[in-house]
Image (cartoon, grey):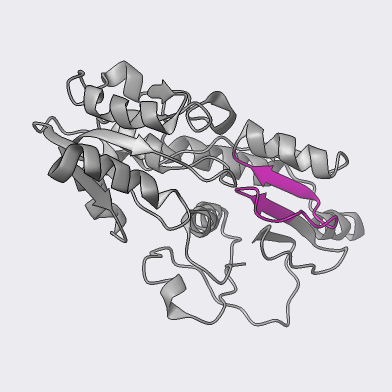
Amino acid sequence: MAPPGYSGGVKSLYTVCGWLGSLGKSTIQPFDGSHLVHWFAHRCEINQNNYKPDLVVYPAIHPINMGEEVFHLCCAFGKYKRIESHADLVVCKSPDTLVWLKEQNPKLRCVIVKPSIQRSLFEYDGRPKKEQICYMTRSHKFPETASQLRERYGNKVVEIVNQPEAVVAEMLKDAKVFVWRGNDKEGSPRPPKEALVAGCVVVGLNDDLNSRFYTDFGLKCSTVEELVGKAGEALRMPMPGVRERAVVRDSAEEKKDWVRLIRSLKVKRSVQRRAQG
């Protein structure tokens, strides 16, 4: 089920559906709005409402309930909405989200599938680094920090706004530093991982760069004032080496986990069919 919006979580869900297509069993039921699929290259069949799948994979923000005979796998890729109790299994992407899920309902059956990025797209290619500080400016992710960086470092600051993924990858490969400020609802953000793989020195707050989100790397700061200062210092630091960049997982490994997970599930209708046969 594709949610009616565009965000990193939506992209993650589409990616999962593409991976599950390798089992020959995935479908997507799209909502209105062509903007949902212009960047979605996977080939998935569109079905009508007159069928019942063995398994439905859906995002927490759109808690579809197709009845007890269907296995409901809910993707909670962030702390955006309370999980409905009909979920047979909830998949999250970080220890932080798992704790949040258990706090709201200790009886939920939950697992973590460790997140990843498409490393081949962001892998640093040896080009000379520019004296640039990248910041991903979003209206809900502290845009005032971009202004503070600009005031201090002028045209050395490059704001990443509404750019395609391939363009973002090139910008990060060019830049020396990436400053990250996340949203407390995110499960495990992609941008700092992408920046690290692209060879940037990642600078962020302690609350954003830590093991709870699988972002335990970079220069960690206690205050925004310290963060702004460290961004400039990072311009003079060596870029992270191959070993440092290797902590970010590749999507091929996450795909294996998803396929293994789906194959391990005891899907109700399939079990009933085998029993009847």
Question: 30 and 174: which one is in front?
Answer: 174
x and y percent of residue 152 in the render?
Answer: 22, 37
Residue at (32, 61) in percent of width and height: 162
* Picture quarter with the C terminus: bottom right
Left or right of 272, for residue 215:
left
x and y percent of residue 113 in the render?
Answer: 60, 38
Left or right of 1, for residue 134:
left
Left or right of 109, for residue 275:
right
Magenta-drawn segment? 73-93
Residue 92 colored magenta? yes
x and y percent of residue 236 in the render?
Answer: 17, 21
Question: 243 and 195: which one is in front?
Answer: 195
x and y percent of residue 138 in the render?
Answer: 40, 55
Left or right of 102, for residue 56:
left
Residue at (48, 55) in percent of width and height: 140
Residue 85 colored magenta? yes
Q: Residue furthest right?
A: 276
Give the prevailing secondary structure in the magenta stretch: loop
Q: Quadrant of residue 130?
A: top left
Q: Quadrant of residue 239?
A: top left
Residue at (19, 38) in percent of width and height: 153
Residue at (85, 55) in percent of width and height: 85
* Picture quarter with the N terminus: bottom right
Question: 238 and 127: which one is in front?
Answer: 238
- Asked if one can make out residue 23 in the rendered structure from this viewpoint, the answer is yes
- Asked if one can make out residue 109 in the rendered structure from this viewpoint, the answer is no
Q: Residue furthest left?
A: 128
**Against 143, is 51 above or below?**
below
How many numbered callouts? Answer: 0
